[in-house]
Image: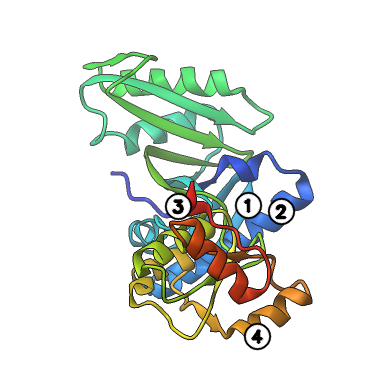
Amino acid sequence: MFQPNCVIVHPAPEIAIKGNQVRAFMQKRLKKNMGLYFKHAKVPFTKMISSAGRIFIYSTEPTKGAYAIRECFGIHSLYLAREEEYSSLKALCKKGAELSSRYLTRGTFAARGKSFSPEFSSKELEEELGGALLDACPELKVKLKSPEKEIHCVAFKDRAYIYFKAEECAGGMPVGVQGYSGVIVSAGVKGSDIVLLAKDLLKTGCSVILVGDKTPEELAEIEKFNCYNQFKRFSVEEAKKLYTVHDLRGFFSAARDEAQAKKDSDLVGVKAFAPLLF
């Protein structure tokens, strides 16, 4: 019977294409953010490990953990997986067939393997795993293109991870990797537009601060995208000082027309970006 004991996270493709130093920085921030989601959901985890372009999270409650981080920006997809130690390719594939006994019973399937072991290739892993499944359940039929179900196995030198289904996540970049951006909260702008702008900025990796005297009530709706942190608010004068010393990278207006965008720019003394105009 398949009982997951970890979560495998595939970071967003935008992270994977970065150079080693930048990618390591972004993955570190992503792990920190995911830890905040686990904490908010009161789900324990023992460790997070980055390897082979993936992040492996070990938890006694992996299903709850996977659900907790589904809204975390920076994650392309995640998988509930079972980590298993193995002594040989044959033993690994036999174990894979055992774990699949309730999930793969009939219909078409494909075995997808990725080997980082020096002992066997990815193709050999797929062939051996597929054969073990057919031996265990003759009613199954192999169909490499558009099968009804799939079994995945990622193998390292002495351990492997088996999983079945991927869950698509929020994508984007980890919140905090792009510095601080100020969202202007002014009387002429709707709270719903401020929420839309703030969420879009979070998805690009910005940390969002509010500039003005009020905090729109609607912002509570998207705190889950901000790692469940409340949005910080600064007065216009405080924000100007932050901008002067480059602690704030820019101002953003949620204006829907040119006149309001100009008012917001005049308020902060510099040209404010107004992406909702377009």
Kindly report which numbered mark, 3 or 2, lies closer to the viewer in this rendering. 2
Q: Are marks 2 and 4 in contact (CB under 8 Å)?
A: no
- Which residue of the protein is positioned furthest toward the front in this rendering? 259
In terms of image quadrants, where is residue 149?
A: top left
Which residue lies under the disc numbered 4? 238
Distance from disc 3 to disc 2, alpha carbons, whole Å, reads: 19 Å
Which residue lies under the disc numbered 1? 50
Residue at (71, 57) in percent of width and height: 25
Report x, y in % for residue 118.
69, 29
Instruction: Choose the circle earlier in sequence order: 2 or 4.
Output: 2
Instruction: Choose the circle earlier in sequence order: 3 or 4.
Output: 3
Distance from disc 2 to disc 1, alpha carbons, whole Å, reads: 9 Å
Instruction: Choose the circle earlier in sequence order: 2 or 1.
Output: 2
Q: Is residue 182 visible?
A: no
Report x, y in % for residue 43.
39, 70
Q: Residues within 10 Å of mark 1 (few under 14, many from 20)?
A: some
Which residue lies under the disc numbered 3? 7
Residue closer to the observer: 29 or 210:
210
Q: Secondary structure at mark 2?
A: helix
Q: Is residue 149 visible?
A: yes
Distance from disc 2 to disc 4, alpha carbons, whole Å, reads: 32 Å
Mark 2: which amino acid? Ala
